[in-house]
């Protein structure tokens, strides 16, 4: 691995030594009506109508465009209230244009009708692209842009696409997908940086084979020099109050871009469960457990993000990025009160009251070093990345339970656990892209990853006030995994046809060792992941397409950990070191009609899908949460997506899917279970614009999810109605917002499990009915776009919260 990293740094050094000679274009801007210097005017160089380089003028009026390659350009200089200045120039040396006077635009703004650029939805051969650059959506945060992307559903601040959790990328680099972390990151990222969101349901070969659907957020490249920043804060009232605040800073000067952000979040989240379990002996009920469970989770979280780009010249760029999530305070208090109705002749009825106090502190540090070299041929480039993750989590749990026996003697039990996990991930990859012709493109790349994780869990039973180690529930688990991958991809366009094919191969080698049991598990396997896409433009109004991809879902490190983690005396969770990876084959055919309506039929066959199954141990009256492979899963249906304008001030997005989900299980004692159900989810999103200056916007969204099967259980229907208002102030430098989420409290649901000798039901009520008030203030050159991004390796996705 060290040799691979050294080789990547050699690439960096080699290519940066061969930069093409570049020049500078400069000048000073003054106003015709006052002869005062004009600050923050945009100065850009265009080549055949495409922006190549740009900057903004400083307070002195001087602008400087650096690293300009020799050639002919059109210089455009623009500033609000003044006519655009245009000049044709040929760069063969450094050019000083001297003083340039911008003429006042005498056209009265009172007579101008303000029009807003609308978001667009377009189908490309392997993805759906929602372009938002320059629209009203970019005046909000990036999370809101993602939430309003057609095809994306957000429930309880968790993303869902095609009824599955997507993997989030920013500029083709994967980000950590813990639901709360990705929400915090994107909620604090200004959307002025977002160009488009790509929904990739069948990802091509260049993306890691791990995972399913991909959401790729494409950031605009910054061309303007200067500084900008923002501060923001939100106050949320649910069952308990919570708040978060943060700041972003960006500076660009000549060859250097620097972005830094910090955010702090303080939360207290409530959750209530009502649980009913019927323990059985064959078909006879032996006891009925009825429990009320209240869980409060408190957290203080710090998130720091730093990005540095250095442009040696127009052909060579080196970038560094670092992301730190730090949780010094995380506490969860769970109170369980239960009544147990014994149905046997012994009639041993009792009640219980359990208190579980669990605390954690953790950090997750991700570092990236990137290098990109652009060759002389337009579009040909080589890029390399080195990634490192340091993850450390320590947890302590104290559990005590008091039992009141109706016809016997009362008693209490208590135990404590100490658990920690340390994980290091290091990876390196190289990608090469070559346009073969104007209509054909070739891509290839390689990647190597090494993961090492050590986990420890120690349980102590409290006996007469003295902790005594429980060797049956204590262990050390060591895990090592290496993945070696390579891919090739070819794309070709004809007059009315487009084709793209790719192959990715991944070799996986892993070893897990449970020290207390001396249980060693090794797996070595190679998998090939083909992908293919074809589309045909039948007419100006109709495009038809079909695609296929094969994907893998590897178990998370916690899934593989064989520890038995006890929540109470009568419930525990355990991993499975012999879990197999899940392989999915996904097929899709669709039609795009007048660039507004998208209809798709799909079929997905998933072998060894991983579920956390909730199983009853009827003999010992224990509830078990066990990670297991499903024999197979079939998922097929029909999707419909549209985005259109009803009025100039009213846009509507509709997503609906009718699908059948079928799971086949083989449980202990060769009990075979088949679960299947037709279901529907529908999301309707309305965006409104008000006032003459369009500074007031509103969003009304509604999501409906019908009853569905989840593993061995059936989940009842849910709905989500939300309303948000946003008002821009002070020439869009400030924004205030008001959000009402889950107005009907429709996220409450019931989960029922009835099959063979399993019979349970619980009602879950999450803390989703909230009111949020937010404020953001932008300062500096607010026309500046940042280089903000957050990256982590594919393997980092498998770290759980």
Image (cartoon, rainbow, N blue to C red):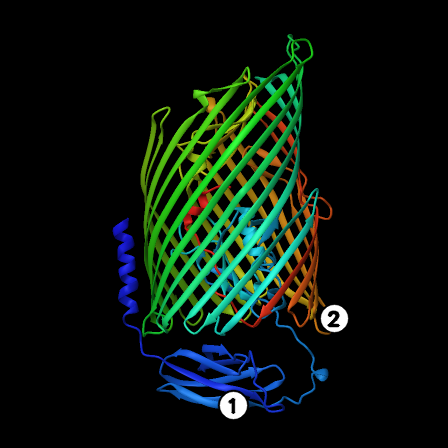
Quick check: 702 above or below 378?
above
The kind of secondary structure element at disc 1 is: strand
Percent from the top left, x then y, of residue 48? Answer: 44, 82
Pick the residue in front: 528 or 581: 581
Count of marks placed on residues: 2
Q: Residue at x 41, y 27 (%)?
A: 475
Tell me, for residue 100, which label it has, or none.
Answer: 1
Q: Is residue 329 left or right of residue 536?
A: right
Alpha carbon distance from label 2 to label 1: 37 Å
Q: Residue at x 30, y 68 (%)?
A: 16
Q: Is residue 340 above or below residue 592?
A: above
Q: Return the x and y of residue 6 as percentages of the image width and height.
A: 27, 55
Proximity of marks 2 and 1: CB atoms separated by less than 8 Å: no
Q: Crowding at label 1, few (<14), some or many (≥20) Cα neighbours within 10 Å? A: some
Identify the disc placed on residue 374: none
- Residue corresponding to mark 2: 691
* Mark 2 Cα-neighbour bin, 10 Å: few <14, some 14–19, many ≥20: few
Foreground disc of the pair 2, 1 = 1
Please state the horizontal and vertical placement of residue 3, each as a whole percent of the image: 25, 51
Q: Nearer the viewer, residue 161 or 738?
A: 738
Side (left or right) of 633 relative to 230:
left
Q: Earlier in the sequence, mark 2 or mark 1?
A: 1
Residue at the spot 39% in from the left edge and 54% down from the top edge: 531
Please tell me which residue lies in front, 502 or 574.
Answer: 574
Q: Position of residue 619 (x, y in %)?
A: 54, 16
């Amino acid at each position: 691995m060290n040799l691979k990293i050294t080789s990547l740094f050699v690439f960096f050094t080699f290519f940066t030594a061969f930069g093409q000679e570049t020049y500078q274009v400069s000048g000073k801007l003054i106003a015709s009506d006052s002869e005062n210097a004009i600050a923050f005017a945009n100065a850009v160089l265009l080549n055949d109508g495409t922006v190549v380089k740009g900057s903004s003028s400083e307070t002195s009026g001087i602008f400087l465009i650096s690293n300009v390659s020799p050639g002919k350009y059109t210089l455009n200089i623009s500033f609000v209230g003044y006519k655009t200045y245009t000049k044709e120039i040929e760069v063969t040396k450094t050019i000083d244009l001297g003083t340039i006077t911008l003429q006042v635009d005498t056209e009265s703004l009172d007579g101008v009708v303000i029009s807003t650029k609308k978001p667009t939805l377009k189908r490309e051969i392997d993805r759906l692209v929602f372009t938002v650059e320059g629209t009203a959506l970019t005046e909000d945060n990036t999370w809101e842009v993602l939430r309003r992307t057609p095809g994306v559903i957000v429930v309880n601040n968790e993303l869902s696409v095609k009824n599955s959790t997507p993997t989030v990328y920013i500029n083709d680099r994967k980000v950590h997908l813990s639901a709360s972390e990705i929400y915090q990151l994107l909620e604090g990222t200004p959307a002025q940086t977002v160009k488009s969101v790509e929904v990739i349901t069948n990802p091509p070969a260049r993306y890691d084979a791990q995972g399913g659907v991909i959401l790729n957020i494409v950031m605009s490249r910054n061309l303007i020099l200067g500084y900008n920043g923002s501060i923001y804060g939100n106050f949320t009232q649910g069952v308990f109050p919570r708040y978060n605040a943060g700041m972003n800073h960006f500076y660009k000067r000549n060859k250097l871009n620097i972005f830094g952000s910090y955010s702090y979040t303080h939360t207290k989240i409530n959750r209530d469960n009502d649980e009913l379990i019927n323990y059985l002996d064959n078909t006879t009920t032996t006891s009925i457990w009825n429990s009320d469970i209240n869980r409060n989770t408190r957290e203080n979280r710090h998130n720091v993000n730093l990005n540095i780009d250095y442009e040696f010249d127009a052909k060579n760029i080196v970038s560094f990025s670092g992301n730190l999530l730090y949780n010094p305070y995380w506490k969860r208090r769970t109170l369980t009160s239960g009544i147990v109705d014994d149905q046997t002749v012994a009639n041993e009825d009792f009640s219980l009251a359990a208190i579980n106090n669990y605390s954690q502190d953790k950090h997750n540090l991700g570092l990236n070093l990137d290098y990109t070299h652009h060759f002389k041929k337009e579009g040909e480039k080589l890029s390399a990345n080195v990634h490192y993750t340091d993850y450390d989590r320590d947890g302590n749990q104290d559990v005590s339970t008091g039992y009141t026996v109706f016809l016997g003697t009362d008693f209490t039990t208590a135990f404590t656990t100490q658990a920690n996990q340390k994980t290091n991930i290091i990876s390196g990859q190289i990608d090469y892209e070559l346009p073969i012709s104007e209509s054909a493109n070739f891509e290839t790349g390689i990647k190597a990853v090494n993961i090492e994780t050590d986990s420890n869990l120690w349980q102590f039973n409290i006996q007469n006030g003295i902790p005594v180690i429980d060797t049956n529930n204590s262990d050390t688990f060591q895990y090592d995994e290496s993945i070696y991958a390579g891919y090739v991809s070819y794309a070709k366009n004809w007059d009315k046809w487009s084709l793209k094919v790719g192959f990715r191969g991944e070799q996986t080698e892993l070893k897990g060792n449970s020290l207390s049991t001396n249980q060693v598990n090794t797996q070595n396997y190679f998998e090939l992941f083909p992908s293919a896409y074809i589309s045909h433009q039948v007419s100006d109004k109709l495009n038809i397409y079909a695609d296929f991809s094969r994907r893998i879902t590897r178990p998370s490190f916690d899934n593989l950990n064989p520890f038995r983690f006890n929540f109470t005396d009568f419930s525990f969770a355990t991993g499975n070191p012999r879990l197999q990876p899940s392989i999915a084959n996904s097929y899709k055919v669709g039609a795009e009609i007048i660039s507004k309506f998208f209809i798709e039929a799909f079929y997905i066959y998933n072998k060894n899908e991983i579920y956390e199954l909730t199983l009853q141990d009827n003999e010992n009256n224990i509830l078990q949460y066990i990670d297991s492979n499903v024999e197979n899963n079939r998922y097929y249906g029909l999707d419909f997506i549209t985005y259109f304008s009803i009025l100039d001030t009213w846009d509507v997005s509709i997503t609906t899917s009718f699908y059948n989900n079928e799971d086949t299980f083989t449980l202990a004692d060769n009990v075979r279970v088949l679960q299947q159900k037709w279901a529907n989810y529908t999301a309707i999103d309305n965006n409104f614009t008000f006032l003459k200056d369009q500074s007031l916007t509103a969003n009304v969204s509604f999501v409906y999810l019908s009853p569905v099967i989840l593993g061995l259980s059936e989940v009842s229907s849910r709905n989500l109605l939300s309303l948000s208002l946003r008002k821009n102030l002070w020439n869009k430098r400030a924004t205030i917002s008001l959000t009402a989420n889950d107005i009907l409290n429709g996220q409450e649901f019931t989960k029922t499990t009835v099959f063979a000798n399993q019979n349970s039901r619980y009602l879950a009520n999450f803390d989703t009915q909230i009111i949020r008030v937010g404020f953001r203030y932008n300062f500096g050159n607010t026309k500046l776009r940042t280089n903000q991004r957050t990256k982590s390796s594919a393997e980092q996705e498998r770290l759980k919260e």
